[in-house]
Amino acid sequence: MRRGKLWLWGLSLLVYAFLYIPLAVVVLFSFNDSQLNAEWVGFTTHWYTVLFNDRDMLQAAANSLLIAVVASSAATLLGTMAGIAMHRYRLRFLPLLAITPVAMPEILLGVSLLLFFRQVLDLTLGFVSIITAHITFSIGFVAIIIRARLAGMDESIFEAARDLGATPWQTFRRVTLPLILPAVVAGFLMSFTLSIDDFVITFFTAGVGVATLPLQIYSMIKVAVTPEVNAVSTLLMTLTLTMIVLAARFAPDALKGRG
């Protein structure tokens, strides 16, 4: 039994090493004092200075932040309502509608949205199409978190509020919302992380003239992987991990699949 545990631990360490060593290499080589970035030459922060003076990269970062804030705010509002509806009404088709964009392959969702925007709506691709696409795939994640939070609550709390004469809106504002607020914040942080990191769906819905941070990084690595790419990847990785940690702190049960 003990040998089995050691084997399992060893295999787990190999899997985690396979996942995280490349990320550590990216962070390390963002401080590499070499233009070619083929081997380690020396330590420098020069590439971060270059990054913060790159207008195209800064504009792409501003676009990504704007899209992520707007999309995650709208997705949090709609996803919260969807999560409450799934918990309250127990209709079979509601979870299907909310979770389908989550389970659908990104490339399929991106192509579907592209065809919908161009052939059905005749919409010019740009900020509106990107934000709409990001809201579409983020709603399901928020709804799942909210529903998991509500599933762990005692229904007698809401019945007591109604027995005391509270209207449905007063019950939501003074009882339901304060109780699910950590899950709402976690849903916002999760959808923000998904939005700012997304490449595949954004690639299909961005159009010409609108560049987000992932698209800008992709255009740069087609030429060469310079330390500037490593620097922006490191900052993006740090932001993403921070958001995930904060989301896990606000709603640990929802993100771990419990409740």
Image (spheres, rainbow, N blue to C red):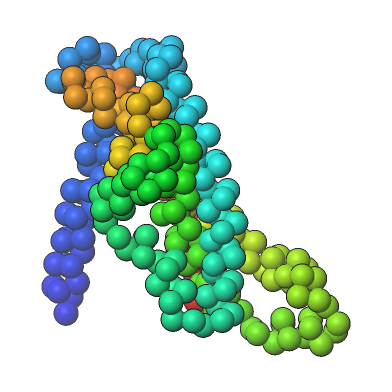
* In the rendered image, the vertical position of residue 252 relative to residue 73, given as above or below: below
Q: Is residue 74 visible?
A: yes
Q: Quadrant of the N terminus?
A: bottom left
* In the rendered image, the vertical position of residue 91 relative to residue 8, given as above or below: below
Residues 159 and 20: in front is 159
* In the rendered image, the vertical position of residue 58 relative to residue 204, given as above or below: above
Q: Is residue 202 visible?
A: no
Q: Is residue 4 left or right of residue 23?
A: left
Query: Measured from the top left, where is residue 175 in percent x and y?
Result: 74, 72
- In which image quadrant can residue 195 be found? top left
Residue shown at the point (40%, 41%) measured from the top left: 122
* In the rendered image, the vertical position of residue 72 relative to residue 27, given as above or below: below
Number of numbered callouts drawn: 0
- In which image quadrant can residue 55 be found? top left
Residues 124 and 24: in front is 124
Query: Measured from the top left, where is residue 134 in percent x and y?
Result: 43, 47
- In which image quadrant can residue 197 be found? top left
Residues 255 and 150: in front is 150
Query: Measured from the top left, where is residue 193 in percent x and y?
Result: 44, 46
Residue shown at the point (26%, 22%) measured from the top left: 220
Q: Is residue 246 left or right of residue 177?
A: left
Residue shown at the point (72%, 70%) measured from the top left: 172
